[in-house]
Amino acid sequence: NNNIIAPGNFEGKYRNDSDVEEIVDLAANSLLNKLIRKSLVESPHNVEVLQRDPTSPLYSVKTFVELHLKPELLQGVYAMGFNRPSKIQETALPMMLADPPQNLIAQSQSGTGKTAAFVLAMLSRVDPLKKFPQCICLSPTFELALQTGEVIEQMGKYCEGVKIVYAIRGNRPLKGTYIDAQIIVGTPGTVMDWCFKLKLIHLEHIRVFVLDEADVMIGVQGYTDHSVRVKRAMPENCQMLLFSATFEDTVWCFAERIVPDPNIIKLKKEEMTLDNILQFYDACANREQKLQALCNIYSTFTIAQAIVFCQTRKTAKWLACEMLKDGHMVELLSGELTVTDRAIIIQRFREGREKVLITTNVCARGIDVQQVSVVVNFDLPLNTDGLIDFETYLHRIGRTGRFGKKGIAITLVEKCCVYMLHDIEEHFGINIKRLNTRNVDEIE
Ligand code: ADP
């Protein structure tokens, strides 16, 4: 769809051109990841397993057949195009499906197959003949709950008699309504209301309690407490499963409140490195000169694809408009866009239909765009103290040069700030060479 944003007209959809830096919106990023994901994210690492009972044998499976699923569920799995379990599923699924049920905490980056795994676990444990709630899955947002529900509906499409219901805002059954769906997917606040205020769900029949995206959940005010409240009312033998893409101490503390005696599975993320990246800088007098520099090197980086990072939305929008005026095709990806619009832009970029993406830190974080060969820092990544934000520098340029390919990073810096580049060089033990953007042959 070419009409998403007409070239030269970034006004319509980009209303709020505030000059403040964007705040990381984990939920939006997570949704975005789901919308643009078409396949599994592979990890070069092996899973780490911490068993509650280290003496019990550890099973892992290489096929879905080995799990002895109900035939209609296996059919659903194959219909989704899953041929074999993902790395995390190989170990997690036997644990999740074991009898007696075992509790599990699993951490791996988004896209590694966690959702598919717990959906499979819920569907394998429900009894379609019993017309009352048996599984509850908590998600951090309305949209994420819908995404999970979609996977349940897809995987469970041959499981006759299995129904799901969404406990999300706007979906409020009347008090006294009888819920005959076996699976409830919702956000913590609404699920809590359905359980305690409206008394729609009898928790004593719940057999599986899933808490998805725990790392996002802890960022939402009140959600951890709501989740814990729901969890406390669960029967003793209810299986508790908790998933997270990251595992800081805060997530860990929360996980311990939700999941007693857990097995723990972790899958490390591929490390970002700067090894394969040639790093350059050019010193400019002001932002107009930086713009000129960018226009000069534009033809070089459209050979492949480039991402240009700005510190604020306002700069990003200004830059996109100026470059268009100058006749350069660019696309603007900014946090003001709805997640759906962002997903469309990223998809077009991935398909190679957009060559140059101008964006802010937050937006492109966590998005894996493997074909990018040039990253431009239009602004130095700074933290709130005005010092170099090394992590963001790594995130911005660490996405290029993957899988042994060479990547190029170019930082445009005001003359007065050139000294700050030494901090980067020192921190990463690298060398950033001067590049004359008025003589672009150097890059080629
Ligand atoms: P996560 O919950 O960790 O983000 P998902 O379960 O959403 O990961 O899986 C990521 C993508 O991989 C989805 O598109 C999903 O359909 C697909 N997927 C999941 N498990 C498998 C599998 N075993 N084989 C192939 N594709 C899979």
Image: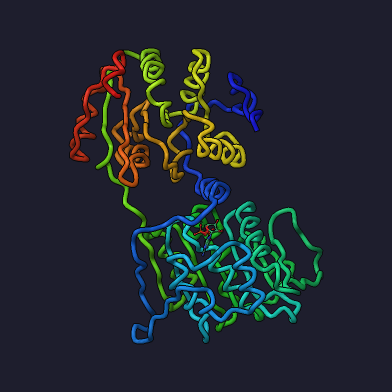
The residue at the point 55 percent across, 64 percent down is 82
Q: Is residue 244 above or below residue 219?
A: below
**Which quadrant of the structure image shows residue 14?**
top right
Query: On the rendered image, what quadrant is the C terminus found in?
Result: top left
**Which quadrant of the structure image shows residue 424?**
top left
Residue 66: give x, y in percent of width and height.
51, 79
**Which quadrant of the structure image shows residue 53?**
bottom left
Residue 395: give x, y in percent of width and height.
36, 41
Query: Is residue 387 shown to the viewer in this render?
Result: yes
Q: Is residue 235 above or below residue 322?
A: below
The residue at the point 65 percent across, 81 percent down is 204
Task: Give the left or right position of residue 194, taking residue 333 as reference.
Answer: right
Query: Is residue 309 shown to the viewer in this render?
Result: no
Q: Is residue 245 above or below residue 386?
A: below
The residue at the point 35 percent across, 14 percent down is 286
Residue 381: give x, y in percent of width and height.
35, 32
Task: Give the left or right position of residue 414, taking residue 9 as reference.
Answer: left
Taking depth in this image into account, of 78 and 52 the one nearest to the observer is: 78
The residue at the point 50 percent across, 68 percent down is 84
Taking depth in this image into account, of 2 and 225 the one nearest to the observer is: 2
Query: On the rendered image, what quadrant is the N terminus found in?
Result: top right
Q: What's the coloring here? A: rainbow
Residue 400: give x, y in percent of width and height.
36, 39
Tag count: 0
Taking depth in this image into account, of 128 and 84 the one nearest to the observer is: 84
